[in-house]
Amino acid sequence: MVDKPAPDATRRSEKSRRAIYAAALALVGEVGYPKTTVEGIAARAGVGKQTIYRWWSSKADVLLEAFLDLSRQAAREAGQEPYAVPDTGDLAADLRTVLRITVDQLLDPRFEVPSRALAAEGLVNEQLGREFVTTLLEPQLQLYVARLRSAQDAGHVRHDVDPRIALELFVSPLAQRWLQRTGPITYAYTDTLVDYALHGIAPR
């Protein structure tokens, strides 16, 4: 069988693409991932089903790309485009800045509603969970890795510290609190996570 050539993204209708993104995110938030269908997305976006299949192979691909686009929008609105962990030379301040932006995103209904639906589905749908981590989560975590490595080079973080593990000291508690609703998501909370992660909890 001859593989079909990859679709030319430059030929996509920007209006249709935006409508499809919005429809996919809205539907998954309203009815959940299992009940979201390509047909439903197409009907809501006002496009033909074949339009979606021309550009994406599945509803998962549509949703993951829609989330990437939403993340870029959030970064643009926060003045953080291209999205990155800032490097001002002050690691604590840089982490506080990007975590505050994350708080804003987590509390934004445009992101929160569909994201919770996908996160819940990812717990029981292993393939979707892997795609979510690979496509969306891990690239963002690697930005923290890069910043922590820069801090190591500057002598602000011990050289024997594994940056990929260290970032979980402030990222994972925030994710858990948001997912399980165990407490409020605030700037004060993430500032405290940074303080505890960088300075520990032993007496100073």
Image (spheres, helix red, strand yellow):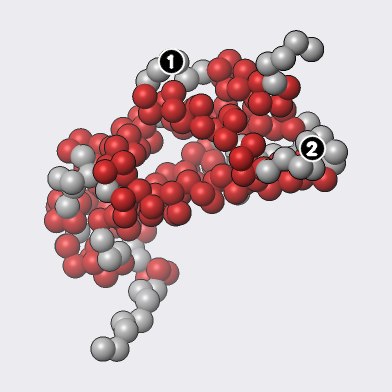
Per the image, the residue denoted by label 2 is 158
Amino acid type of the residue that numbered disc 2 sits on in the rendered structure: Arg
Q: Position of residue 139 (x, y in %)?
A: 54, 51
Of the residues shown, which amino acid type is indicated by label 1? Answer: Gly
Q: How crowded is the residue under tag 2: few (<14 C-alpha within 10 Å), some, or many (20+)?
A: some
Residue closer to the observer: 19 or 179? 179
Q: Is residue 118 left or right of residue 41?
A: right
Report the residue at 17% width, 62% height from top.
49
Reply above or below: 125 against 204: below
The dot on residue 183 is 1
Find residue 86 and name its label. none
- Looking at marks 1 and 2 on the same chain, the residue that comes earlier in the sequence is marked by 2
Q: Quadrant of the C terminus?
A: top right
Residue 66: in sight, yes or no? no
Please give the name of the residue rendered at 38% of the width and 54% of the height, measured from the top-left corner. 131
Q: Residue at the spot x=68%, y=48% of the render?
A: 146
Q: Position of residue 119 (x, y in %)?
A: 34, 39
Asked whether the viewer can see residue 154, the reply is yes
Tell me whether the residue at label 1 lies in contact with that at label 2, contact meaning CB atoms closer than 8 angstroms: no
Q: CA distance from mark 1 to mark 2?
A: 31 Å
| Position in image of residue 121 (x %, y %) | 27, 42
Where is residue 165, by image quadrant? top right
> To which quarter of the image does residue 8 belong?
bottom left
